[in-house]
């Protein structure tokens, strides 16, 4: 069965590669485009590849817009698996019979997707809940398919070496790692509880909590909640207020909590009868360290103040730009991006679009963009679209200016972690113990030096710099000798000096040319091995 599956996957991608070649040779040919065929290929190959495509849709820094548009249409709605299987999975995951766990359990699922399906239920204490059940054998299937995909990625690099700069194998491995996390519902339950804690004092936000002791790797029980979707016409009269609430909620997630909901599309956001925004589905979340939050705040400030230098420094700190870069060229490019926004109405400004444009300045060099920043870009794009659904006239820039400085001040006032303070206290205590002995040694050395202060300067990295300079000097010397051999041999050839070989060819000129070619080859090989001149 496994070889047949691998053969099917290989054949599907071979067909995709052939279409790409055909489109390159005959661009005007009718039929599916390569991005459309790519999407349909992933859908045919099943749940693993649908999730793979959805993960690729995060890579706006690498993929062109037509691929992103095609991948955004990927559907993971699949036929539900039998209720008898769902019941068995629940009992196996929670280690108790269904009758012991629930007073009611609806066999008909309310939703089914590629990873799991959801059933309504009622607990013994009367609480209405949803039961998220992972598809049986989905985890080993993902592992098998991703191993095959890694083999395909290695083959693609051999066939098309130009694609190696995108590091496709590393890209597949990263997506595989994150898919494993997404199929572990224990992690999702931890995410839910962190969000519940983060918004417990908010009267405008509601997060349905996970039910204690009813969570396993393959089963998640969560309090049932709902209402109108945010794109429901019934909520439109309250749209401007809800849009402001959603902006405040995400600024709180980005700059205070350091954890954010990565998929705020209308299907995951509901408006409760009390007018609160209710978040659902915490399978995709992003984490922002304290340093990343500060970098994001700096990027936000650079953007709203149209400062290209500030924006560039923040992008470098965030890790969305790096590697070999011409700073002046990047500054000019960011000036163009910010200048384009300066000519737009304020309601058309988009932080998500600007973030993506700056990221793309790396021209594919930034395969190492942190995964959480990719989720951030997705959240920004989807979140802005949702905001404009609620309030088409929302001036996002005004809100960012008003709240951005406030969030920045909060970050500056933020106390360092207790662990950092504890370490600082320990290091100071240890240093205080060592100071008397170090001072005694220093005074002894000063006496031995006749009263002169013993100061030693230690340079780090000069040894490697010296080796590089010596290597460069040697290359220059070899190049000069080689050039001299070429010039001297040419003069000998011109004046026909010395004994002849092959008729009228001067022997000394032949020897000189041969030696020069030999030195040229060694010089070129040395440069190639070190990766540059």
Image (cartoon, rainbow, N blue to C red):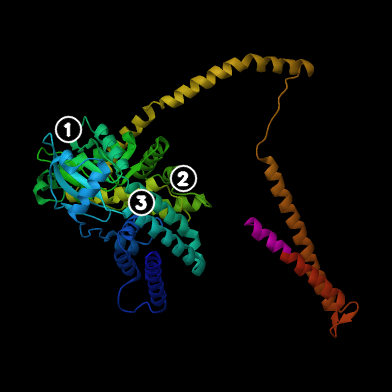
Q: In which quarter of the image is the N terminus?
A: bottom left
Q: Name the residue under label 2.
A: 316
SS type, badge 2: helix
> Predominant secondary structure in magenta?
helix
Q: Can residue 450 be seen in this view?
A: no
- Compare marks 1 and 3 and give the one earlier in the sequence: 3
Q: Mark 3 points at which residue?
A: 179
Q: Name the residue under label 1.
A: 203
Compared across the picture, whether 452 is left or right of 159 comes to right
- Compare marks 1 and 2 and give the one earlier in the sequence: 1
Task: Give how far across and how far down residue 470 sits, in percent.
Answer: 74, 49
Magenta residues? Answer: 522-533
Looking at the image, which residue sits at the far right?
A: 499
* Quadrant in which residue 227 is drawn: top left
Q: Residue at x 52, y 51 (%)?
A: 323
- Compare marks 3 and 2 and give the one earlier in the sequence: 3
Label 2, residues with CA under 10 Å away: few <14, some 14-19, many ≥20: some
| C-alpha separation, residue under disc 3 versus residue under disc 2 | 28 Å
Disc 3 versus disc 2: nearer the observer: 3
Q: Quadrant of the C terminus?
A: bottom right
* Count of picture labels: 3
| C-alpha separation, residue under disc 1 versus residue under disc 2 | 37 Å
């Amino acid at each position: 069965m496994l070889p047949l599956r691998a053969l099917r996957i290989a054949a599907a991608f071979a067909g995709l590669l052939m279409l790409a070649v055909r489109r390159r040779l005959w661009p005007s040919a009718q039929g599916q485009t390569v991005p459309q065929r790519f999407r349909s290929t992933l859908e045919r190959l099943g749940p693993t590849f649908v999730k793979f495509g959805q993960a690729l849709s995060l890579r706006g820094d690498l993929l062109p817009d037509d691929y992103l548009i095609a991948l955004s249409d990927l559907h993971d709605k699949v036929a539900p698996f039998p209720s008898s299987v769902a019941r068995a999975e629940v009992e196996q995951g929670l280690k108790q019979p269904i009758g012991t766990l629930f007073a009611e359990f609806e066999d008909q699922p309310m939703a089914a997707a590629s990873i799991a399906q959801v059933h309504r239920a009622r607990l013994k204490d009367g609480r209405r809940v949803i039961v998220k059940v992972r598809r049986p054998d989905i985890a080993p299937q993902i592992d098998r398919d991703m191993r095959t995909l890694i083999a395909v990625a290695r083959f693609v690099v051999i066939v098309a070496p130009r694609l190696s700069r995108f590091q496709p194998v590393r890209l597949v491995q990263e997506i595989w790692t994150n898919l494993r996390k997404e199929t572990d519902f224990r992690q999702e339950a931890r995410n839910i509880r962190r969000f519940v804690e983060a918004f417990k004092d908010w009267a405008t936000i509601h997060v349905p909590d996970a039910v204690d002791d009813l969570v396993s790797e393959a089963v998640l029980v969560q309090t049932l909640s709902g209402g109108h979707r945010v794109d429901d016409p019934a909520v439109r009269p309250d749209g401007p207020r809800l849009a402001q609430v959603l902006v405040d909620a995400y600024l709180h997630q980005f700059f205070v909590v350091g954890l954010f909901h990565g998929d705020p599309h209308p299907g995951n956001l509901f408006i409760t009868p009390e007018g609160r925004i209710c978040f659902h589905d915490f399978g995709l979340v992003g984490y922002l360290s304290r340093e990343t939050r500060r970098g994001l705040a700096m990027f936000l400030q650079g953007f709203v103040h149209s400062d290209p230098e500030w924006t560039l420094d923040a992008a470098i700190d965030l890790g969305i730009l790096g590697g070999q870069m011409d700073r002046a060229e990047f500054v000019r490019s960011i000036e163009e991006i910010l200048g384009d926004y300066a000519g737009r109405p304020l309601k058309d400004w988009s932080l998500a679009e600007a973030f993506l444009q700056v990221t793309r300045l790396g021209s594919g060099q930034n395969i190492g963009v942190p995964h959480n920043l990719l989720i951030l870009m997705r959240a920004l794009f989807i979140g802005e679209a949702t905001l404009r659904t609620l309030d088409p006239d929302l001036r996002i820039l005004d809100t960012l200016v008003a709240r951005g400085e406030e969030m920045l001040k909060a970050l500056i006032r933020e106390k360092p972690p207790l662990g950092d303070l504890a370490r600082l206290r320990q290091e100071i205590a240890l240093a205080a113990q060592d100071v008397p002995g170090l001072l005694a040694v220093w005074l002894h050395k000063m006496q031995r030096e006749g009263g002169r202060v013993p100061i030693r300067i230690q340079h780090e990295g000069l040894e490697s710099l010296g080796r590089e300079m010596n290597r460069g000097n040697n290359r220059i010397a070899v190049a000069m000798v080689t050039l001299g051999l070429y010039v001297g041999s040419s003069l000998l050839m011109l004046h026909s000096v010395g004994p002849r070989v092959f008729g009228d060819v001067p022997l000394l000129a032949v020897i000189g040319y041969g030696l020069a070619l030999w030195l040229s080859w060694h010089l070129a090989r040395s440069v190639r091995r070190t990766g540059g001149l």
